[in-house]
């Protein structure tokens, strides 16, 4: 039972035949298409009507969040609440190419509260802002947390694990040392899988897609010194514990 808890089908559709990509992943239990802005939120709501194993995360990427007024953010949160998503995402903090950290934190805090109010996971972006992101999650008493592509150091990973957060391992783990270290540091009961499709592909010069998780699963199992079948069962159990339990 494979899962991809973080991809962007609306962006993948621009680079590949989406019907083919979804056919390649027909044996997946769940694929969560994450949103990045109001337009993306609306587009992603269309996919579960077409693909039975797709669920939707609605949210606001930091880069877009800082461009909107407080009223626009609040209106979008009302829209998200009304459409009852499977998760909140992709939301968080970015200190790499996004300015106005104060505004980012204000918006992120609103989405954490929304996640708690709806009792659904929040899928978190933390690029070059790992410490600030953990602090914001803690300050807002985040309940169900998925750290997407986390690149923080050993101490920050341990802090997240202690808080009960889950960490997604992207398909680029097959060639990326940072994410191989993350596999080592995160205990088995806190690991989930993602693609971030169409990004972070394990295959050179090819857009990423959910089916490529089958490749990263081999590497994760190898690092954890268990069989691929055992790793799949553990990740499916983790997914159930976070997403399907009240």
Image: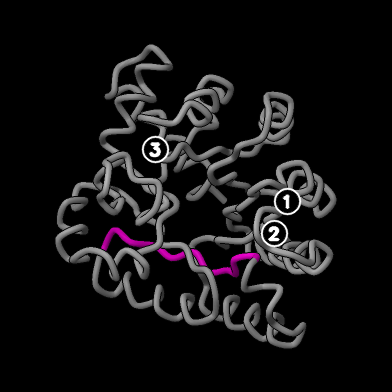
- Residue 180 image position (x, y, % from top left): 47, 25
Is 58 covered by the magenta stretch? yes
Q: Residue at x 33, y 22 (%)?
A: 230
Residue that label 3 marks: 172
- Residue 67 in the image: above or below residue 197: below
Q: CA distance from mark 1 to mark 3?
A: 28 Å
The reply to whether the C-beta atoms of the residues labelled 2 and 1 are less than 8 Å apart is: yes
Q: CA distance from mark 2 to mark 1?
A: 7 Å
From this viewpoint, is residue 1 visible? no
From this viewpoint, is residue 60 visible? yes
Q: Quadrant of the N terminus?
A: top left
Residue that label 2 marks: 116
Q: Is residue 150 left or right of residue 194?
A: right
Chain-order first, disc 2 or disc 1:
2
Of tags 1 and 3, the one toward the viewer is 3
Highlighted range, magenta: 52-62
Q: Residue at x 62, y 73 (%)?
A: 64
Quadrant hosting residue 120: bottom right
- Residue 193 in the image: above or below residue 125: above
Of tags 3 and 2, the one toward the viewer is 3
**Tag 2, which secondary structure?**
helix
Q: Residue at x 72, y 63 (%)?
A: 108
Scheme of colours in the image: one colour
How crowded pointer 3 is (Cα within 10 Å; few <14, some 14-19, many 20+) is rated as many
- Residue 219 image position (x, y, % from top left): 34, 24
The reply to whether the C-beta atoms of the residues labelled 1 and 3 are less than 8 Å apart is: no
How crowded pointer 2 is (Cα within 10 Å; few <14, some 14-19, many 20+) is rated as some
Q: Is residue 203 left or right of residue 167?
A: left
Q: Is residue 177 left or right of residue 63?
A: left
Chain-order first, disc 1 or disc 3:
1
Q: CA distance from mark 3 to mark 2?
A: 30 Å
Residue that label 1 marks: 142
């Amino acid at each position: 039972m494979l899962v991809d808890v973080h991809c962007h089908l609306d962006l993948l559709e621009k680079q590949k035949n989406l019907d083919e990509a979804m056919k390649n992943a027909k044996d997946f239990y769940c694929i969560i298409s994450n949103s990045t802005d109001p337009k993306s939120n609306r587009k992603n709501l269309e996919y579960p009507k077409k693909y039975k194993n797709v669920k939707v995360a609605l949210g606001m990427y930091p880069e877009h969040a800082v461009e909107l007024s407080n009223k626009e953010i609040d209106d979008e949160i009302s829209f998200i609440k009304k459409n009852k998503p499977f998760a909140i995402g992709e939301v968080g903090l970015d200190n790499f190419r996004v300015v106005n950290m104060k505004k980012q934190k204000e918006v992120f805090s609103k989405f954490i509260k929304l996640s708690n109010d709806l009792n659904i996971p929040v899928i978190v972006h933390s690029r070059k802002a790992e410490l600030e992101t953990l602090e914001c999650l803690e300050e807002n008493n985040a309940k169900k947390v998925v750290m997407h592509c986390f690149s923080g150091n050993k101490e920050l990973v341990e802090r997240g694990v202690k808080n009960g957060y889950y960490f997604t391992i992207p398909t680029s783990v097959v060639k990326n040392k940072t994410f191989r270290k993350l596999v080592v540091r995160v205990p088995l009961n806190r690991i989930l899988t993602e693609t971030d499709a169409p990004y972070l592909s394990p295959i050179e010069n090819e857009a990423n897609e959910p089916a490529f998780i089958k490749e990263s699963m081999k590497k994760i199992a190898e690092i954890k010194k268990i069989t691929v079948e055992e790793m799949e069962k553990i990740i499916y159990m983790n997914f159930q514990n976070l997403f399907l339990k009240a």
